[in-house]
Image (cartoon, coloured by chain):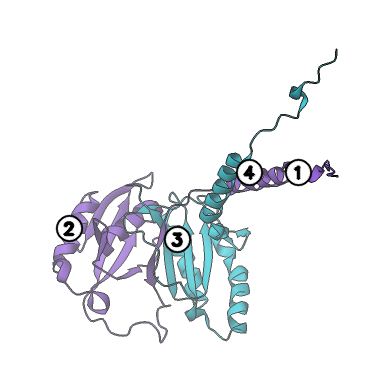
Chain colours: A purple, B cyan
């Protein structure tokens, strides 16, 4: 005799999805909340040993370029002067001048490149200082960066002027 | 006569595509999450520069100093004026000494707010120089193109 077994296991096996979905949504919310689009960051390296120490460069291979940045009352750039040449407020003109000074893109780089000393008014905004450093240290052409002046240093602070 | 209806069966949605999507989203956010944000401070808005490019080699012993728009400095979560930075840097020097390094080996990463007076940055550099630090990195962010 054939016994027909009523078999419960023939039913579709079901997983309890609810708890997994709960956890997965929590994870999703965590990642969405902590997500922050971060922009690329870079550094300008400045090597400035304490004057008078053994690490300080004893001899200058070439005369340093003196970059004077004047600020107006609000801390904005008023005038850019490089070795007595005034560039007004035009950082691009400064960049072009530096490019021709170091001899174009094939000019000396690294250790042989000239040194720029930045002499700024105390209240000049840091943003403009960075603009000046950008104009002096290189030029971006497409995705490539051409390095112009590698060595930068700051002149003593002009406080109370 | 009582008719047993099939509609009484539990209605079930097919969850598979939704779970697939959700896992994809989680994978996306996991890959993009940036854990290096501990270096950042919300109060500091970096100046931007077209030359900003992540350094190819990592800085040796970086010490991150935030300089806020009010001219105060934040080192490792402690805020003080530029004049009071000595004890905070002294702490970092202790760590360097334990690793048999000197201040000259460390890199001071200056994250200055874009509107802070440039002279404050110079003051900060002078204070660090007085403690023997030599290498400085002025942190900037990429200019939106």
Question: Residue sitting at 43 percent across and 74 percent down?
Answer: B135
Label disc, if present, on residue B121 of the rendered structure? 3
Q: Is residue A116 visible?
A: yes
Which residue is denoted by mark 4 in the rendering?
Answer: A29
Please state the horizontal and vertical placement of residue B24, each as a whole percent of the image.
Answer: 54, 48
Apparent side of residue A75 relative to residue A91 in the rendered image (left or right): right
**Which residue is label 1 attached to?**
A10
What's the CA distance linking mark 1 and mark 4? 38 Å
- Which chain contains the residue that carries disc 2? A
Task: Tell me the distance, in whole angstroms, between the alpha carbons under discs 4 and 2.
Answer: 50 Å
Viewer-side residue, A26 vs A131 = A26
Q: Nearest the camera: B26 or B3?
A: B3
Which is nearer the N-term, disc 1 or disc 4?
1
Q: Chain of mark 3?
A: B
Q: Secondary structure at mark 1?
A: helix
The chain to which mark 4 is attached is A
Q: Residues within 10 Å of mark 3 (few under 14, many from 20)?
A: many
Q: Is residue A23 left or right of residue A70?
A: right
Residue contact between numbered discs 1 and 4, judged by CB atoms under 8 Å: no
| Residue A12 shown left or right of residue A8 in the figure | left
| Quadrant in the rendering for residue A69 | bottom left
Residue beneath label 2, please?
A96
**What percent of the width, then of the height, locates residue B70?**
53, 50
Circle 2 SS class: helix
Q: Give the tally of numbered discs.
A: 4
Question: Are there few (<14), some (14-19), or many (20+) residues within 10 Å of tag 2?
Answer: some
Whether residue B42 is visible? no
| Label 1 Cα neighbours within 10 Å, binned few <14 / some 14-19 / many ≥20 | few
How many other residues sit within 10 Å of disc 4, few (<14), some (14-19) or many (≥20)?
Answer: some
């Amino acid at each position: 005799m054939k016994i027909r077994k009523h078999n419960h296991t023939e039913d579709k096996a079901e997983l309890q999805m609810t708890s997994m979905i709960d956890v997965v949504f929590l994870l999703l919310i965590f990642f969405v909340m902590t997500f922050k689009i971060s922009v690329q960051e870079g550094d300008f390296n400045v090597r400035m040993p304490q004057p008078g120490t053994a690490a300080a460069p004893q001899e200058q291979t070439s005369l340093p370029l003196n970059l004077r940045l004047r600020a107006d009352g609000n801390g904005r750039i008023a005038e850019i002067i490089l070795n007595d040449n005034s560039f007004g407020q035009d950082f691009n003109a400064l960049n072009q001048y530096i490019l021709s000074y170091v001899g174009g893109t094939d000019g000396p780089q690294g250790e042989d490149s000239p040194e720029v000393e930045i002499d700024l008014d105390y209240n000049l905004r840091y943003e403009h200082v960075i603009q000046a450093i950008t104009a002096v240290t290189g030029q971006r052409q497409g995705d490539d960066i051409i390095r112009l002046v590698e060595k930068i240093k700051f002149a003593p602070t002009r406080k109370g002027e | 006569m009582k008719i047993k209806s099939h509609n009484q069966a539990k209605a079930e949605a097919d969850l598979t595509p939704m779970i697939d999507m959700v896992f994809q989203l989680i994978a996306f956010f996991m890959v993009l999450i940036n854990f290096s944000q501990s270096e950042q401070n919300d109060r500091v808005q970096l100046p931007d520069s077209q030359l900003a490019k992540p350094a190819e080699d990592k800085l040796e012993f970086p010490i991150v100093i935030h300089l806020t728009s009010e001219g105060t400095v934040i080192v490792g979560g402690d805020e003080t004026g530029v004049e009071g930075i000595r004890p905070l840097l002294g702490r970092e020097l202790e760590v360097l000494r334990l690793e048999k390094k000197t201040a000259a080996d460390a890199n001071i990463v200056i994250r200055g707010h874009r509107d802070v007076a440039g002279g404050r940055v110079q003051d900060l550099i002078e204070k660090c120089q007085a403690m023997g630090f030599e290498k400085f990195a002025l942190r900037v962010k990429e200019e939106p193109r």
